[in-house]
Image: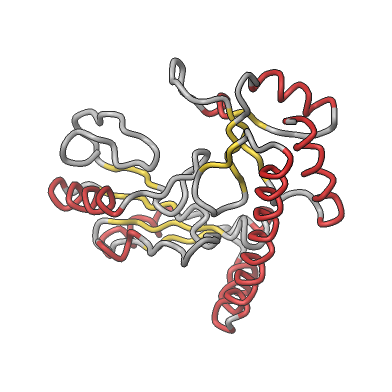
Amino acid sequence: GVPGGTDARAGTGAPVGAGVDAVVLTPAHQFPLGGVLAASRRSAAVRWAAATGGLIVEDDYDGEFRYDRHPVGALQALAPDRVAYAGTASKTLAPGLRLGWLVLPAHLVEPVLAVKDAHAGALDQLALAEFLDSGGYDRHVRRQRLAYRRRRDRLVAALTEHVPAARVTGVAAGLHALVELPPGRTEASVLAAAARRGLALEGLGAYATPGASHPPALVVGYGTPSDSAFATAVNLLCAVLG
């Protein structure tokens, strides 16, 4: 929560109840709507934490993959004593590595170390540390950012050409796009048609709270298909929506 009774979490505006001690934010890129936490709301969240002693847990979701401009700076830099910054190598490297990190306020370091899983793989951690120190990780992320940007551009271009009534929303970031359906189409009918063609898609409704109003839309991930299958997948999507 933040002063004024609005929720600081990206993509929401719900009131926060009394006694809130912590909030979890995804300032860089919210899933699934694809929004970025505005500067004014970042500042409001920091003021709330300073005034109440609350903790902000910043999940740097998709922070590495912003395509239309430089990645958004971490909220943690605004209040390092009130923000716990969390990141993971699941998208940049592989989810199977199960590697992540925390940048903690000083007063939380010892308590977190006390409960940290002592069986985390030392070899994996040492290899990642060397990858970071050598600059190899940064070079890898830059290559991946370019590859995923090209995929997103191809997806948007194909939809613009073949299904102009569909609209891609959200900022150009991450590994998914939110595609609002053409007028008259429903999520259920499009998902059924996609399944018949072998496309695995999700509707925005799968992420909505009960009773929430939202336009019919698809959450389209473009990171999974292999290079050889990507063009076919995009063509099938256009055929389903056309």
Residue furthest to the bottom in view is 134
**238 horizontally vs 11: left or right:** right
Rendered image quadrant of residue 234:
top right
Percent x, y of residue 109: 34, 62
When the figure is inspected, residue 217 is found, relative to residue 130, above or below; the finding is above
Residue furthest to the left in view is 51
**102 horizontally vs 13: left or right:** right
Question: Residue at 43% across / 20% down in the picture?
Answer: 212
**Nearer-the-camera pick, 220 or 236:** 236
Point out the image quarter for the N terminus.
top left
Percent x, y of residue 119: 57, 58
Residue furthest to the top in view is 211
**46 horizontally vs 28: left or right:** left
**Nearer-the-camera pick, 82 or 156:** 156
Question: Residue at 71% across / 24% down in the picture?
Answer: 190
Question: Residue at 66% across / 62% down in the picture?
Answer: 93
When the figure is inspected, residue 224 is found, relative to residue 108, above or below; the finding is above
Percent x, y of residue 95: 65, 53
When the figure is inspected, residue 210 is found, relative to residue 43, above or below; the finding is above
**Nearer-the-camera pick, 109 or 99:** 99
Percent x, y of residue 111: 33, 56
Point out the image quarter for the C terminus.
top right
**Nearer-the-camera pick, 76 or 203:** 203
Rendered image quadrant of residue 28:
bottom left
Question: Residue at 52% across / 60% down in the picture?
Answer: 66
